[in-house]
Every structure is written in C-alpha cells, then in structure tokens.
Image (tube, rainbow, N blue to C red):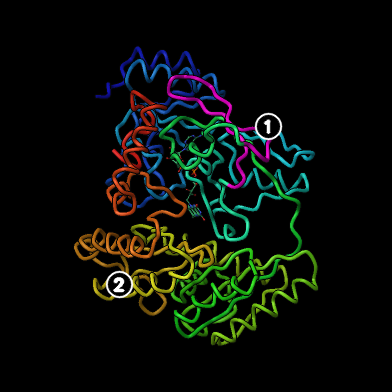
Amino acid sequence: MFKKLDPSVLERLRQIVGAADVLVDPERIEDYGHDEFSLSEIRRLPEAVVRPETCEEVAAVLELAVAERLPVTPRGGATGLCGGCVPSLGGIVLSLEKMSRIVEVDRENQMAVVEPGVTLRDFVAAVEQAGLAFPPHPGDESAMMGGLVATNAGGSRAVKYGTIRNYVRGLELVTPAGDIIQLGGKLEKSSTGYNLMHLVIGSEGTLGVVTKVILHLKAKPGIMRSLVVPFEALEPALETVPLIMKRGIVPLAIEFLEIEPIVLTEEHIHKKWPTKLGRTHLLIILDASSDEEMDRLSQAVAEICCEKGAIDVFIADTPSKQDEVLAIRSKIYDAIKAGTVEILDIAVPRAEVAGHVRKVREVAEKYGIWLPTFGHAADGNVHTHIMKVRYENGAMVPVPESEWRPKADPVREELFRDCKARGGVISGEHGIGLVKKPYLSIVLDERQIGIMRGIKRVFDPHGIMNPGKIFD
Ligand SMILES: Cc1cc2nc3c(=O)[nH]c(=O)nc-3n(C[C@H](O)[C@H](O)[C@H](O)COP(=O)(O)OP(=O)(O)OC[C@H]3O[C@@H](n4cnc5c(N)ncnc54)[C@H](O)[C@@H]3O)c2cc1C
C-alpha cells in the first residue's frame, strides 16, 4: 500500500524544510528508529527524518506524503514506552524538535502557548519564572509538549491535579489533508459542537500533527511535604490509600513502592531513603497553603496510616530530605532500566489496586519471574515491570533470555485480563502504540474499535498518519 521514498520526493522535502533538515544518513537517523521501549525487535529505521520549523512546513510535508502515499510518524522527545513514535512501516519520521518556542506565557489569562517541541523541563522552568505553575509532572522531563498531548500523559500528581488533558485549552492541528485547524482557544468553557480537541488529545499521532498547544496554568503552589510510611505487608499499605481519600484528604501524590527497587536506586544514585523497615512503602506527598494546614494534614494522614498498621511515619520536612526522597522515586527507572523488558501502566479503580497487585504477585510466583510493581496508588495506575533479571541480595542478576522471553507475553496477557475483570484499562497514561495493540480488544469491544477506525478514516482517509499504531 505504501510507496518507497524516491530521490525526487527527497528533493521535494529538501525544498520544503531545507536540505539540512532532511536526514537520511544511517548514522544520523539511527536514533530515530526507537523510543524507550526496550526490545530491539520493534525498532525500525525511517527512510528519512524531516525536521520542520513551522506549521506551514508540516502541512506541506503531509500534503506531499498523501500524494506519494508515504507513512508519516510524528516524534517528540521519544520518551514513550510503547513504540508510539517508531516508524514501524518505514517512511518519514516527522521530528518536532525544532519547533521549540514558548510563544507566550499569558499571566492575565493564566495560559501558555507553546510549540510541540518544547520540553517539559523548559516549559516548567518558564512557567515558574512567570510566577505560575503547571502541576502535571510525568516522570521524564525530556518529553515534549506535543508528545505529552498525543499520549494524554499523566504522572503521580494526577490524583489531585489531573492529567495533561485537564490543562489543554487549545490545539493547532495539521491534518493529513494539509489543513491547519485551530481547536479550542484561551477558553475555560466551550459547548460548541463536537470537541475535536479532546479527540486529538491521546490520539498518539494517528489523526494529525499537533503544532501548537494552549495550556491552562495555575497559581504558584504553597508548601510541600513528603511522608514515607513503611508497612510490613502489601494489603494494609494499599488499603490505606482509599481510606485517606475517603476521609476527604487529597494528597498531591500517593506512590506505593516495594523495598527492592528502593535499595537498588539508593545504590545507583548514592542517596538514602529514610527507612528500610517493612516491604511495602507509601510515599505520600502533601501540598498546602500554610504551615498550619500542612501540620493538620500530616497529622491526619499519619493517624490513618497508623490505624492501618503502619510501622512508622517518616517526615521529609526539610528541602534536602525532601529532595533526597523525590530523587530516589524519580530515579528508580534509571536504576532498574538495564534489567527491564517492559513497564506496564494498567489503571484500575483505586479500591482494586490491592487486589490487582496481589494478582501480580501470584503471576510472578506462577511463572518464576521478578515483577517489581509500584506506581500512582491514589489514581489506580500501577506500573508492573516485566524483568529479565532476578533480585538477589541487593543486586540484579541476569536471567538467560531463553527463560524470560517465553514468559513475557503470557504474563502481560494475564495481567491485562485481571485489569479488565476489575473494570480497568491496559494503559492509564503511556498509550497503546505498537506494543499494546494486540491486547486492545481485551478491554475495548469491536464496536468501540470500529468507531475509532471510522474517526481515523475521516481525519486520514489515506491512512498515512502513524499507521500501525493503536489498532490496524
Ligand atoms: C523515565 C520515564 C518516566 C515516565 N514517566 C511517565 C509518567 O509519569 N507519566 C506518563 O504519562 N508517561 C511517562 N513516561 C512516558 C513518556 O514520557 C510519555 O508517554 C510522554 O508523553 C511521551 O512524550 P514524548 O515527547 O517523548 O513523545 P514520543 O515518545 O516522541 O511520542 C509519543 C507519541 O506521541 C506522538 N507524537 C509526538 N509528538 C506529536 C505531535 N506533535 N503531534 C502528534 N503526535 C505526536 C508520537 O507519534 C507517538 O505516538 C515516562 C517515560 C520515561 C522514560
């Protein structure tokens, strides 16, 4: 169905974006064939990488791609974990890295306007400099704003402040027909027809290319405090989470962690976690507008934890203690990356987290595989890691590929089926991409997938936009 990119098309691309921004040299395009998903079998080199600087250039590239029937895969920071930006059918990788201007931070309306290639790191810094805040904080700051919108990224603060979707107020989208359309605006309300903007959020580059984003900003937050709460067993720790919420306290984040990844991360970054007691820990991060409110919240949360049998409650109340705890949480990925095959991001109702994690442990036992599991307990988003190593005496010990590889698929499928049985979804924040596509029908029925296919055809009748992702 798709054609190969011939020299005349390359020449046209060079005319659109300039010769320096059409890359074909194997060494230079090597990095554009993968994202953060670990297994090399999903990698594929594009035929060309194109780096536009304006939405008009994006539109011209898409028009050409439709005329020549070439697949186009948009790419942001490539921090995705399911192969979403991998050009699995070849063709063009459209890298948005050069569209990296923060167009405006509008203090009056508390809105920012950014291009898709702005990194989360740069965006947060600019917003803070303007005395405002952007609360969502997915774990990798090199993710770009276009990618964050395309995956509807979440992160640990979603329980209190929502996901990226809750902050997007407007999008500029280039459709595969080469039209540049403006969706939404600097608006807090809109009931004006179908909401195409929300359809595009989370569409993983399959409907068009996001070339501008308007984001809602919040007033600067007050103070933050982290509580580290060890429990002997899994159930009481996880059952504490819905209880805190039921009592009317909404922390900035509640992460649950197992002791093994903490130990590995301490070693990896040479920092200390406040305690080694117990096997399951809660990291509860609170925010408040005054010291009095913070003390009251901390006290109430500590009492609930003790009621559920917490061994102790450690408070990181100085900036340095707080930094140490948050650094360990955010570096777990780096510490265990070398032994990780895949990070799942199943989301279940909050009260089902304990049951699901219990199932993870049963599956780990049944298959004889290490499945460290932690995540955003308060919003039901569980990150089980399928590992190709085992944990032994504070270290990761490699397992032969012939042992772990045949287990990965059945483990993934059993956990996806458990999530379905609990009313959950197979992706709470990373998206479906390439890797979870075979499992979509576990949680969505054929009618829903059929409607999605129909929507895709309306936006992209020739099927050139990130083909092969989410569904076939
Ligand atoms: C250490 C680590 C921690 C992470 N923590 C979190 C977390 O807490 N929460 C979370 O949600 N995710 C997390 N992620 C996953 C990842 O960071 C997010 O999925 C992020 O949104 C991807 O953004 P990106 O710019 O890297 O996109 P990419 O990986 O480049 O692309 C992702 C998808 O978006 C599409 N896309 C990219 N740009 C555009 C555009 N301009 N227009 C249309 N489509 C586009 C691509 O085609 C692809 O389908 C983490 C990843 C890592 C490595």
Badge 1 is on which residue?
Answer: 103
Relative height, residue 75 to residue 326 (above, below): above
The quarter of the picture where residue 193 lies is top right
What secondary structure is found at the residue carrying circle 1? strand
The magenta span reads: 166-190
User: How many discs mark residues in the rendered view?
Assistant: 2
Look at the picture and state if 15 lies above or below 144. above
Residue 213, position as x, y percentages in the image:
60, 35
Question: Is residue 319 one of those drawn in magenta?
Answer: no
Q: Residues within 10 Å of mark 1 (few under 14, many from 20)?
A: few
Q: Looking at the rendering, in which quadrant would you find the N terminus?
A: top left
Q: Nearer the viewer, residue 395 or 76?
A: 76
Whether label 1 lies within 8 Å of ligand 1 gets the answer no
Q: Is residue 406 above or below residue 307?
A: above
Q: Amino acid at mark 2?
A: Ala
Q: Is residue 293 left or right of residue 190?
A: right
Residue at 80% of width from left, 73% of height from top?
292
Horizontal side of 309 relative to 362 (left or right) equals right
Residue 385 x, y percent position in the rendering: 38, 63
Label 2: element kind? helix
Residue, disc 2: 364
| Residue 181 is a magenta residue | yes
Residue 29, x across and y down, in percent:
39, 33
Rendered residue at 39%/61% (across/down): 423
In the rendered view of the protein, which quadrant contains the C terminus? Answer: top left
Query: Percent position (x, y) of residue 19?
Result: 47, 18
Residue 364 vs residue 219: left or right? left
The quadrant in which residue 190 appears is top right
Task: Look at label 1 and name its amino acid.
Answer: Val
Q: Check residue 396 in the rendering and tell me which mark sits there, or answer none.
A: none
Q: CA distance from mark 1 to mark 2?
A: 48 Å
Marks 1 and 2, the one that precedes in the sequence: 1
